[in-house]
Image (spheres, rainbow, N blue to C red):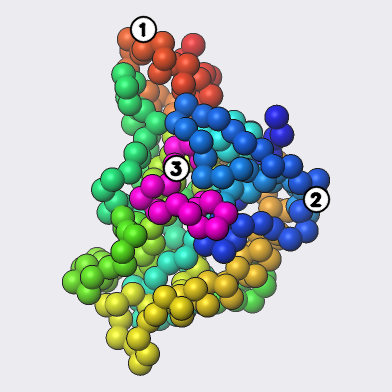
Amino acid sequence: MAEAKIGIIGGSGLYEMEGMTGIEKVRVKTPFGEPSDAIIVGNLEGVKIAFLPRHGVGHRISPTELPVRANIYALKSLGVEWIISVAAVGSLKEEILPLDLVIPDQLIDRTKNRAGTFFSNGIVGHIIFAEPFCPVLSQLLFEAARDIDIRVHKGGIYVAMEGPQLSTRAESQLHHSWGAHVIGMTASPEAKLAREAEICYASLSFVTDHDCCIETEEAVTIDTIIANLQQSIANAKKIIGQAIACLPQTRDCLCTNALQNAIVTSPDLIPKQAKKDLALLIGKYIK
């Protein structure tokens, strides 16, 4: 099977990367079902990458229905150690404008109906998640964004909402009162599952609109959101191209050994099926 160390999970409109060579489409079966779509593996800037369209090509899968466990597991099975997430978000701050880029460092999870862990069915694991986004990868993305001269905000709180509906005004005002910076529908459970899989994960969160708590002169429409997203895609590709060429050869961040001492179930009590399903993740700790 094809291998890659860098995974890109693309959101709306980002289905492929120009300049990729040696492209191979890979379909991966996992214990958690099939990923959103075939994974596109190829070379970009001399680096092997694996690209996964988050909602499937043609945007067929709702945020709530995303097979996130299968997506992260599939990338892990290809050898991925770094995941760059590209996502559309709404701004909860007056000073964060449409077409700006936010690289968040914190996360508030308000999702309700999503499987958010690999650890169930007889095995329990408690990862440390105080820093939900990889600081090393986030810094590299910030530097790459700064180099291409776009408005980029380093750090910020990402509110992950269930969707697929956008916020009510009361919900938006609540999130604004918390001091959150952006709101989107995909960072959780992606960030949680990536950490459980010991994969570095960071987000390029492109602002498409102000959330409804911010009064603007023009009413936000879905057409406006999509148009702003399309403008952001070209910047995302430039940033990714620069960042992947600068990734370190070895990792020494908190993500690398996130499962060390995290699995609290006695090894002799873990069901055989759970051990088999999670061998890719836990095999170096539990035989």
Q: Residue, x 46% and y 72% (percent of image)? A: 207
Residue placed furthest toward the top: 268
Residue 260, image quadrant: top left
Does any portion of residue 153 appear in the rendered image?
A: no
Number of numbered callouts drawn? 3
Label 2 – label 3 distance at C-alpha: 27 Å
Residue 171, percent across and down? 22, 67
| Residue farthest left in this picture | 170
Q: Which-is-in-front pick, marks 2 and 1?
A: 2
Magenta stretch: give its range.
Answer: 54-72
Which amino acid lies under the numbered mark 2 shown in the image of this protein? Thr
Residue at image point 66% right, 56% down = 16
Residue 159, how many percent across, how many down? 33, 60
Image mark for residue 21: 2
- Image point (34%, 60%), residue name: 164
Q: How far apart are marks 1 and 3 (CA)?
A: 29 Å
- In the displayed structure, would residue 269 be above or below residue 19? above
Residue linked to disc 1: 268
SS at mark 1? helix
Q: Identify the residue position indicated by label 3 in the image.
A: 68
- Of the residues under marks 2 and 1, which one precedes in the sequence? 2
The percent coordinates of residue 123 (x first, y second) are: 34, 21
Q: Nearer the viewer, mark 1 or mark 3?
A: 3
- Relative to 119, 137 lies left or right: right
Amino acid of disc 3: Val
Q: Earlier in the sequence, mark 2 or mark 3?
A: 2
The amino acid at mark 1 is: Asp
| Nearer-the-camera pick, 206 or 128 | 206
Q: Distance between the residues labelled 2 and 1?
A: 46 Å
